Amino acid sequence: MEIHKIETGNFKLDGGAMFGVVPKVLWSRTNPADSNNMIDMSATSMLIENGDRLILIDTGLGDKQSEKFFSHYHLWGDFSLEGSLKKHGFHPDDITDVFMTHLHFDHCGGSIKYSEDGKQLIPAFKNARFWTNQEHWEWATHPNDREKASFLKENLLPMQESGQLHFIKRKGNRQFVEELGFEVLYVDGHTDKQMIPIIDYKGEKLVFAADLLPTAGHVPLPYVMGFDTRPLLTLKEKKAFLDEATQNNYLLFLEHDPHNEVINLKQTEKGPRYNRTFTFNELFKS
């Protein structure tokens, strides 16, 4: 198995929304805001080479939305999904599987694109199977008012219409997914049945933390996003996960942190805390 870090693009979000009830004077120590209260965010994917499978975990925002849409997210930097794949020697047609932690637009927007004539929305990976789970699909395609702006039908329905959509058959809150070759942890605090990949890689447990832990600044338990639908459940899920990650020295791959690629944790009298930042390359590409 080989894993590559895939940079799909960077954006900004409101810092208050990202940290919920935590005062700005506290969260801005780790995630400084600009004059508009916006903080830096990344949309970093992971590409897994495993035998004849090429599995992409999440696909970022994509580029098909309107200029007005993207103006709310203050895109910055030069990264793109296709450009990052090319850098590692791959083409979108090489991807065999796209695993989506959940279906918010910043995690699956790159899965769908416009056809060359601009008239149709089609899968960006024509040879891939798109993986989610039945419960989350129902949640996303019949959205509640709180998440309606995050579940965009143009990101979702073309997967189904193409026949490329597949559901992982959920077995409890944690399972090994044979089709993909890694373990999945289900969490419900951020959105219903978000899936967190836990991958055995080169003697380490590497966790794609998605929106259970979006940035290194979110490690303390009360630092929960205002976007979470069930924040008290996030606290419970996060505590169990951080305790396990600390005890077993898991490496946490941070999808949304442009300044801390991979971190580990340490136990303190206040509970698990950020310990050290690593680049993905220094850990696995030396």
Image (cartoon, rainbow, N blue to C red):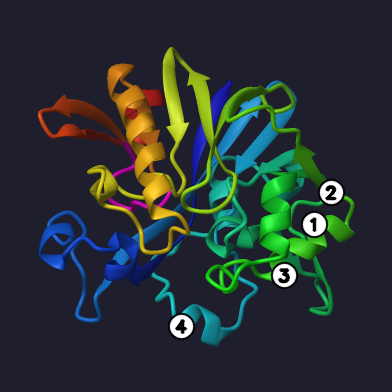
- Quarter holding the N terminus is top right
Q: Is residue 267 left or right of residue 70?
A: left
Residue highlighted by disc 3: 153
The single residue placed furthest to the top in the displayed view is: 203
Q: CA distance from mark 4 to mark 2?
A: 31 Å
Q: Is residue 133 visible?
A: yes
Residue 71, label in figure = 4
Q: Quadrant of residue 205?
A: top left
Residue 208, label in figure = none
The one nearer the camera, 76 or 250, is 250
Q: CA distance from mark 3 to mark 1?
A: 10 Å
Give SS at disc 2. Answer: loop
Q: Earlier in the sequence, mark 2 or mark 3?
A: 3
**Residue 285 pos. (x, y %):** 41, 26
Mark toward the viewer: 4 or 1? 1
Chain part drawn in magenta: 255-262
Mark toward the viewer: 2 or 3? 3
